[in-house]
Image (cartoon, rainbow, N blue to C red):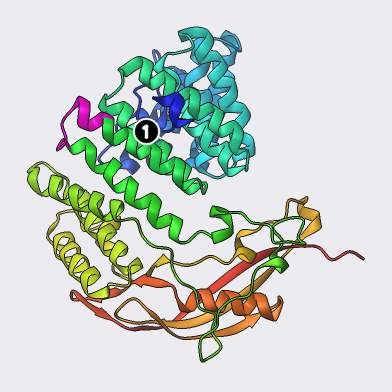
């Protein structure tokens, strides 16, 4: 199954070595940090039975569980130095080493995260075997950092291996393998491989339906993923999906694009690609499963309703979209967790469709010193129906044609509107700044 799908991704494993994602968050993160700090202080003062190595690792965990990864790194690093006294390949090195790698990754220091995580992975494989699930979290975060560094092929290789480990450990159709395949689909979608993403979600859905049941809660995420991949695809440049080199162009050159149709006002006509009804059917089925499950998370229901509303917006069916949005708004207000992301989903307009111009998507394959950035800043109003009005270029430092291409794309974008007391409202003064990467002019 995994081999056919090419790769595999994130799986919520339960590694034996403690890492931040595997710990149970305290009810009060600050209290947890204070307790860990007290342990470190006691260990430094020589309190009997208190290990400084363990106390520092616990402090790193406490900071990480609170999302304070910059603060977690020094604690993990000191704990690692103490653990290395037992040997650089000793199993006691794993916990602080993995924690340090995760802290670097989560705080955006991917260059520092990768070598730590690679070292942790080598130790895990040597100590526990090639297919032991203890390496799942390490593989997940390592792949994320490699992806952030644009080393996508290496990331994919690790995700392939990770998926095979999951399937070998849990068996095809297990909920955890379904989750892994869904995360794989998300990774493919986010890296522009929408067809591979769709296939991954389909594999997850088929296995969940076969092994569990067609209406098991585990089918919801694959169903949503199938739609999500198609929705993301709508905003990708057409050239990404069907590369073409016009006659006389050696590459997919931006200046070799075919002529565009223009409307009576001189605006470029951009027609969205047709949405596959499979995605809408998948969302309908997901909502049905959630409605039938009394234990279903209200937050997942809200997110799925919002996703269906976004789908309708991309279809340019604002009346249908509003129906789903208002259901989600009402449910989010009734839910106990008012601070969840779903509860804030309608506080301001959210873009759900933007036909990205190729000039924006294209990044020259040149060293940083041979490229430069340009920008286009546009101001507009998001109407109550999610459409864009009164769009205008405020400033730019690029070619007039590039600026117009971006303006035309903004004009046909679609938004999830802001809701006030459950009703959509116009929001003027939205400012959007698009950045372009261009080759540096030769002197």
Q: Tell me where residue 212 sits by quadrant.
A: top left
Give how far across and how far down residue 242 sits, in percent. Answer: 56, 54
**Which residue is situated farthest in the front direction here?**
247
Q: Can residue 285 be seen in this view?
A: yes
Name the side, left or right, on which 398 lies relative to 72: right
Q: Is residue 34 visible?
A: no
Residue placed most toward the observer, 122 or 181 = 181
**Which residue is situated farthest in the bottom direction here?**
265
Name the side, left or right, on which 441 lies relative to 183: right
User: Which SS class for mark 1?
Assistant: helix
Give how far across and how far down residue 361 sits, in percent. Answer: 60, 60
Residue placed most toward the observer, 309 or 279 = 279
- Of the 4 image quadrants, the one containing the N terminus is top left
- Is residue 102 shown in magenta? no
- Is residue 211 shown in magenta? yes
So how many labels did they put on this image?
A: 1
| 405 up-or-down from 286: above or below | below
Give how far across and how far down residue 306 sits, in percent. Answer: 26, 60
Which residue is located at x 45 percent, y 20 percent? 135
Residue placed most toward the observer, 191 or 123 = 191
Which residue is located at x 21 percent, y 28 percent? 210
Give how far across and how far down residue 441 sits, in percent. Answer: 84, 66
Rate crowding at label 1 as few (under 14), some (14 to 19) or many (20 or more) other CA atoms within 10 Å. many
Residue placed most toward the observer, 205 or 127 = 205
Which residue is located at x 50 percent, y 82 percent? 379
Residue extent of the magenta highlight: 207-216
Which residue is located at x 49 percent, y 22 percent? 161
- Of the 4 image quadrants, the one containing the C terminus is bottom right
Name the side, left or right, on which 244 lies relative to 229: right
Label 1 sits on residue = 181
| 131 up-or-down from 333: above or below | above
């Amino acid at each position: 199954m995994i081999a056919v799908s090419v790769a595999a991704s994130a799986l919520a494993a339960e590694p034996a070595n403690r890492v931040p994602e595997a710990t149970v968050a305290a009810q009060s993160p600050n209290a947890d940090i204070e307790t860990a700090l007290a342990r470190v202080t006691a260990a430094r003062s020589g309190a009997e039975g208190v290990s400084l190595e363990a106390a520092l690792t616990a402090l790193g965990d406490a900071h990480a569980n609170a999302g304070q990864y910059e603060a977690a790194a020094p604690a993990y690093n000191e704990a690692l130095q103490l653990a290395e006294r037992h040997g650089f390949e000793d199993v006691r090195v794993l916990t602080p080493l993995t924690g340090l790698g995760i802290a670097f990754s989560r705080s955006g220091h991917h260059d520092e995260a990768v070598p730590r995580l690679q070292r942790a992975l080598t130790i895990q494989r040597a100590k526990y075997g090639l297919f032991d699930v203890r390496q799942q979290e390490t593989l997940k975060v390592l792949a994320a950092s490699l992806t952030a560094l644009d080393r996508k092929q290496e990331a994919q290789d690790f995700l392939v291996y990770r998926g095979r480990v999951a399937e070998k450990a849990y068996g095809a159709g297990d909920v955890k393998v379904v989750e892994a395949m869904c995360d794989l689909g998300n990774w493919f979608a986010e890296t522009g491989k929408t067809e591979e993403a769709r296939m991954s979600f389909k594999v997850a859905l088929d296995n969940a339906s076969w092994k569990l049941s067609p209406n098991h809660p585990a089918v919801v995420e694959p169903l949503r993923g199938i739609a999500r991949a198609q929705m993301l695809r709508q905003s990708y440049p057409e050239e990404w999906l069907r590369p073409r080199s016009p006659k006389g162009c050696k590459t997919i050159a931006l200046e070799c694009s075919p002529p565009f149709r223009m409307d009576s006002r001189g605006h470029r006509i951009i027609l969205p690609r047709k949405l596959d009804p499979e995605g809408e059917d998948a969302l309908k089925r997901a909502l049905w499963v959630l409605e039938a499950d009394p234990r279903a998370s209200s937050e997942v229901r809200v997110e799925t309703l919002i996703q269906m509303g976004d789908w309708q917006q991309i279809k340019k069916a604002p009346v249908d979209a509003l129906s789903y949005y208002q259901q989600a708004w009402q449910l989010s207000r009734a839910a106990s967790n008012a601070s969840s992301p779903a509860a804030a989903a309608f506080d301001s307009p959210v873009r759900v469709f933007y036909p990205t111009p190729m000039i924006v998507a294209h990044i020259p394959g040149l060293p940083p010193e041979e490229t430069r950035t340009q920008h286009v800043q546009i101001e507009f109003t998001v109407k109550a129906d999610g459409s864009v009005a009164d769009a205008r270029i405020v400033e730019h430092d690029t070619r007039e044609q590039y600026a117009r291409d971006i303006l035309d794309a903004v004009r046909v974008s679609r938004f999830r509107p802001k809701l006030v007391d459950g009703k959509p409202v116009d929001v003027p003064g939205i400012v959007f700044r698009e950045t372009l990467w261009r080759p540096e002019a030769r002197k």
